[in-house]
Amino acid sequence: MDQLLRTPAVAGSFYPDSGDELRLQIERWWRRMPPAPDPPPRALVVPHAGYEYSGETAARGFALVRDAPFHHVVLLAPSHYDSFSFASVFSGDAYQTPLGLVQCSRDLARALAGMAPVFRLSLRGHSPSREHALEVQLPFLQLALNRFELVAVAVGDLDAGQIAQAGEALARLCAGGETLLVASSDLSHFHPRAAAEELDQATVGAIEAGDTGAFLAGVGTGRLEACGAAPVAVAMSATAGRRWRLIHYSNSGDVLGERGAVVGYAALAVC
């Protein structure tokens, strides 16, 4: 029986479409970074822009889980092109990248969909789609973990109750310590660089504080900004009581020299 694959949508634009080039780019970043900690973090927040802009920040986050003993990864990302009011758990067999196939755990996907009504088995936000926020994380995971199964979740427009429900379900799913939780989000978009850095500092501080309600309230009023606010809030809810810390911050102005309109990126981890 043919597998239902999600083929790459942004290879060759957001990151190299050559497997060899892609591997070299990521390994070049990692060579400049210290060994992964033991024990590894249980959860990450990482950016999802093109590698030219946010790749090194993402690499610093994923460097913390190199060779970690995770058998599964639950990957949460926003849906930029499709609007829906639930968390769409990919119902296919695998995501494909230039490094090969990332097999999805149908058993774990079904289990998650059965834990809370906010989760639904679906192709919404996955395929067919130009969505990049899930896809750009996968090459890092393929090289960091070698062998794992994926649960890919495109997070739609959730209210606070749905976020709490999703967080509670994921806390139970990840309780055994064999599942890594990853939330994909960039920070502020297209503010002057100084203003962006101030806004991003406040957003990072709110994540580190661990108060999901305060984080969502800040996003709602514009005091905080994250394009993956719902995935981040779900991850915060799932890791309630654990401490988040900033691993690396950057913005597109670091690459472009732009001061007039930049996008912010951060990698954070749960200790």
Image (cartoon, helix red, strand yellow):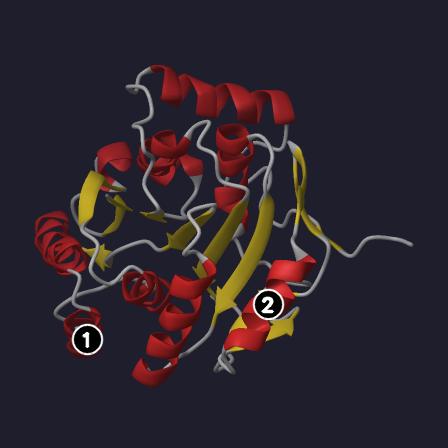
- The residue singled out by tag 1 in the image is 213
- Of the pair 138 and 189, the residue shown nearer to us: 138
Q: Is residue 162 left or right of residue 14?
A: left
What residue lies at 42% left-to-right and 64% top-to-bottom? 172
The amino acid at mark 2 is Ala
Can the viewer see residue 258 in this picture?
no
Kindly give the residue lying farthest to the front in the view shown: 176
Q: Residue at x 64, y 68 (%)?
A: 110
Picture coordinates of residue 9, whole percent (x, y): 62, 50
- In the image, 144 versus 131, the foreground residue is 144
152 shown above or below 216: above
Q: CA distance from mark 2 to mark 1?
A: 27 Å
Q: Quadrant of the C terminus?
A: top left
Vertical position of residue 52 compared to residue 115: above or below: above
The residue furthest right is 1
In the rendered image, residue 141, in percent from the top left (x then y), is placed at: 50, 37
